[in-house]
Structure formats: structure tokens, C-alpha cells
Image (cartoon, rainbow, N blue to C red):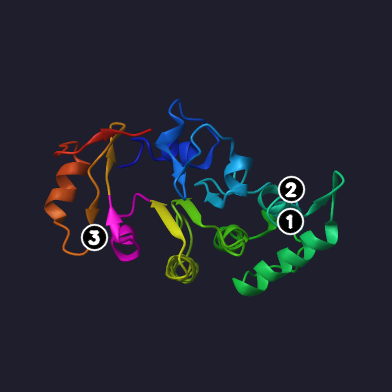
Amino acid sequence: VAGNGQNALLLAISGEELSRHPEAISIDGAPVGGLPAKQRRLKGLASVPEERNGHAAVPEFTLADNTVLTARDRLGMVSAGMIKSSSARTYAGEVITAFAVKALGPGSTAGSLSGGNLQKYIMGREILQKPSVLVVSQPTWGVDAGAAAAIHQAIIDLAAAGSAVVVISQDLDELLSLCDTLAVINGGRLSKPMQVEGADIEEIGLLMGGIHGEGAVHAV
């Protein structure tokens, strides 16, 4: 439900905000709630926030420079404190090709891309790093049907390859088509997870309306 803690959940999982309970968030069984975003990325976490321009990407930066924001440590784009520009350009080119991003090349600025192409680029930048965990907020917000389909397929393929994917979305149809397990956040409370297959739409509606069933807990 919009405005009921989705962004806070993204920040908590990604490490942009630290948890008071380190054990509340774990990667491969290791508690990471007290680790900052950089350390979580090194442990295999990737994240895509809702806001494309200004949060996920810097509009004035080139696509190559924008890869450095999240891939520099995992892909070794920095040496002796210096950015390896050739590595950044190469990786940006790989993302553009793999995700069919309409751009002139790695030297294009993020702000010059359409919303759908920028979202495909941001998703590709994270997915091609082969994270063990990906958390993505509103993955297809404001993009056209073609870009949405490509993004959905990329998420499905990543999960099929063995990664855990957490999708935070206001679009119930999107969640039902992408996810195996579903939980509802309302008023800062997280419902008991349920299997999407055979899920009771009426029950989901009640949870979205703030009527929490057994197992509801405060979101971390």
C-alpha cells in the first residue's frame, strides 16, 4: 500500500539505513543489519530504488560513470584510489547490449535517456553483477509496456538462476505475476507471508485495508 513503509523497507534492506537489530537482516545466514550499503554489496546484495534520477542514477553523469556508483567494488573498477574508466565503459556497453537500452553509448548521460531505457539500464547494471540478493522498488513504475516486459523477464531469469529477489511494488498484478511469496505492508506492519499460488485475493484486500491477520509484525 503506497506510503506505508515500502521506501523504509528498501532503505533498511539495502543498508542506506542501519537496523538497530543486526540479526533482523541476513545474507546467506550472516547478520548484516548493522553493515552499511557498501559492505552489503560486497556480500552479494544489489538494490534498485524507486527514484531513477537522483537516487539510482545521477542524470548529469555518463552511463559509464553511473556504473561506478554500485559496481566499482564488486567488479574492481577502482585501483589505487583511481577509477578504471575503461572497465566502466566496457561494463556500461555490456549493460546497454544485454538489456537493449536505446542510447548512443556509454558516454551518453543518464538524463538523456527515456524513463524506460534508464530503468532498463539501472536494472541491467545491478543484474549483470549476478547478486545473490536483489531488492527492487517499483521496478516498472512509469515505463512503457515493452520496457516493463523486458524488466519482468530479467527479474524472472535472475530468480531462476538462483538469486533471491525482493520486489516492492504498489501494483498487485505485477506482484502476483512475478513472485512466489507475498506479504503486505500497511501502517508500518508486515503481514504474515503467503504463497502466491492459491492466494486469497479477498484476504490480500483485507490486509491492504489494514486488517492484519495472525503473524503481522512491525517492519524493520
- Tag 2 residue: 60
For badge 2, the amino acid type reads Glu
Residue 51 point in image, percent of width and height: 53, 45
Q: Is residue 100 left or right of residue 136?
A: right
The residue depicted at 19 percent of the width and 36 percent of the height is: 210
Q: Is residue 121 magenta?
A: no
Residues packed near mark 3 inside 10 Å, few (<14), some (14 to 19) or many (20 plus): some
Q: Is residue 85 left or right of residue 190?
A: right
Residues packed near mark 1 inside 10 Å, few (<14), some (14 to 19) or many (20 plus): many
The residue depicted at 30 percent of the width and 42 percent of the height is: 1
Q: Where residue 131 is drawn, which disc sits there?
A: none
For badge 3, the amino acid type reads Val
The residue range painted magenta reads 169-182
Residue 220 point in image, percent of width and height: 38, 33
Which of the marked residues, 2 or 3, is nearer the chain's N terminus?
2
* Residue ranking furthest to the front: 29
